Image (tube, grey):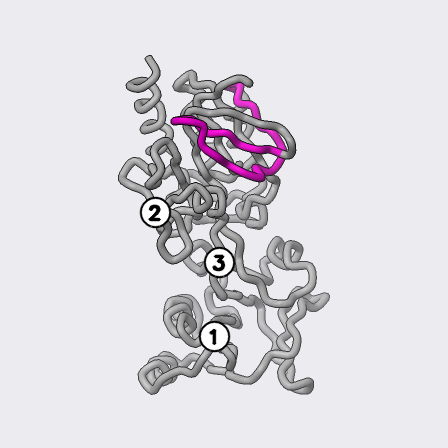
Amino acid sequence: MQMLDTLIVGAGPAGLTAAIYLARFRRRIVLIDSGHSRAALIPVTHNYPGFPDGISGAELLARLAAQASRYGVEIQRGTVDGLSRLGEDFIAEVQGQRIAAKTVLLATGVVDKCPDIANIPAATLSGCLRWCPICDGFEVSDQSVALLSTAKAGVAHALFLRTYTPRLTLFVDPESGALDAAQRGAIEQAGIRLVEDRIEKIHVSGEQQVIVRLNGVTELCFDTLYPMLGTDARDALGVNLGACCSDGELVVDAHQQTSISGLYAAGDVVKALNQMNIGTAHAAIAATAIHNKLRDNYR
């Protein structure tokens, strides 16, 4: 079994950036791609530096993969089913195959908690569903926007979105709790419509509008819906090794190393702001730290 310098798990912007850096450091690496990068669903981002006309998530990933391939990066399609230690090294189980590596970088990202809506990928690519107002709130300026969230987090999300449009409706699931007087006052002062009725169905119309049905009768129509119900980090590989987490995300040091020596993490799986720019910065830091660690420990 060949020993790699680094196994990278995840082929989003963070994983691909790390692969480019490590390949240019002349390290023996393999990148495992499950094919489920969250970035692939971005119809177009105008928030990523260097692309004044915007770029789709799929095109950005393709460009990064093409850049990595120039340096001989091996991208292997599959899923890492398990990760264990063998002395100071790591053994990954990849669909029946065992891969040994001196270090591992997890760039596995997060999964959005989704409401019950048919064909979410198509609705996201059309722009009817959006998931990150930091990334694309500007694109919904002055539109009719709906926000679906919880009582705990919804007010903060709504006040953030209010930056971009006065035509904002906050839907709060009644089972998620109740808003207190201060929250209600903040919503009212900002001119945000509050709906606490149970949602029966959400669907996207043929005119690419989001229809929210309440109580079997009332239907409300919006240009865009932000389902901001939280995310689940794909952190199981690190957690199962005993890596420290906080609020469901991996905790890393200044060099992106987890509490497990030799195990690094970058991107949305890390406790930090979930942005592609941040993920690629994480990757640059992690890759350089990995290279230095390998240089110092495996001369």
Q: Quadrant of residue 258?
A: top left
Closer to the chain start, of discs 2 and 3, is 3
Q: Is residue 98 left or right of residue 26?
A: right
* Residue where numbered disc 1 is placed: 168
Q: Nearer the viewer, mark 3 or mark 1?
A: 3
Closer to the chain start, of discs 2 and 1, is 1
Closer to the chain start, of discs 3 and 1, is 1
Task: Give the magenta part as a residue range.
Answer: 70-94
Regarding mark 3 in the picture, which secondary structure is present there? strand
Task: Tell me if label 2 and label 1 are in contact, CB under 8 Å.
Answer: no
Q: Nearer the viewer, mark 2 or mark 1?
A: 2
149 in relation to 127, above or below: below
User: Where the N terminus falls, by quadrant?
Assistant: top right
Task: Tell me if label 2 and label 3 are in contact, CB under 8 Å.
Answer: no
* Residue where numbered disc 3 is placed: 231
What type is the residue that disc 2 sits on?
Val
Query: Magenta stretch: residue 83 in it?
Result: yes
Q: Nearer the viewer, mark 2 or mark 3?
A: 2
* Residue where numbered disc 2 is placed: 251
What type is the residue that disc 1 sits on?
Leu
Query: What secondary structure prevails in the magenta region?
Result: strand
Q: How many callouts does the rendering have?
A: 3
Label 3 and label 1: CA atoms lie apart by 22 Å
Instruction: Report x, y in % for residue 21.
Output: 41, 25
Label 2 and label 1: CA atoms lie apart by 35 Å
What type is the residue that disc 3 sits on?
Thr
The residue lying at 62 percent from left, 83 percent from top is: 214
Q: Is residue 52 left or right of residue 61?
A: left
User: Where the C terminus falls, by quadrant?
Assistant: top left
